[in-house]
Amino acid sequence: MDAEVLLALAAITISILTFAFTARETHRIELRSRMPVLAFVWDTGESAWYVRNVGNGPALNITIGQRDMNGWFNPVRVPAISRDGEFKLWWLGQDGDYALGARYNDFLAADQQAEYFAYCINDTSLVFRPRQSPKWALSRDVAQQAQQHWLSTLSSERPTSQPRDPTSS
């Protein structure tokens, strides 16, 4: 082969690699631009757990569960949480001898059954993207057994419909 053909093949190869890299990075940027990130937050003023969306898009189809040494228990469905929104986990009380987990979707993945998983234990939070959840994550089987938060009989306290300002104490 002469130098011109090799140069042309090198240019085509570099172009294909650049296109593939750009397409992958564009997809990652698009994913992050709409990705909800749920975080479990303890409010010392109210002595209550909240789940807060600190990500960029709404979190849908949320199931919250508790985990101890025996596995997951007490799965509860909660309403969608908007960007910068939160929801009081009123049925949890003040006991904290368990981990908390949440399975949820973003607004596009809700149709594709791609779920995120957020996990909190000992003030350490982890978020896993779709198809990267660990084997010990809150399973779909447990999540499907979840009761709606408004039907929960775990506490006599009921959530308020008024949004709470997280910056106020």
Image: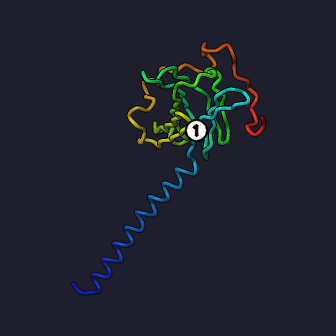
Residue at the image point whose x is 33% and y is 72% from the top: 13
Q: Residue furthest left?
A: 1
The colour scheme used to paint the residues is rainbow
> Where does the image place residue 132, in percent across and percent down from the top left?
41, 42
Q: Percent x, y for residue 106?
A: 55, 40
Quadrant in which residue 20 is drawn: bottom left
At 45% from the left and 60% from the top, the residue drawn is 23
- Label 1 secondary element: strand
Q: Residues within 10 Å of mark 1 (few under 14, many from 20)?
A: many
From the viewer's perspective, is 108 left or right of 136?
Answer: right
Q: Nearer the viewer, residue 38 or 115?
A: 38
Identified at 65% across, 22% down, the residue is: 90
Q: Out of 47 and 76, give the one closest to the viewer.
A: 47
Residue, far bottom: 3
Whole-percent x, y for residue 161 in the image:
73, 26
Task: Give the quarter of the figure containing the N terminus.
Answer: bottom left
Residue at the disc numbered 1: 38
Q: Nearer the viewer, residue 139 or 79?
A: 139
- Which quarter of the picture shows residue 54? top right
Which quarter of the rendering shows the C terminus? top right
Name the residue type under label 1.
Leu
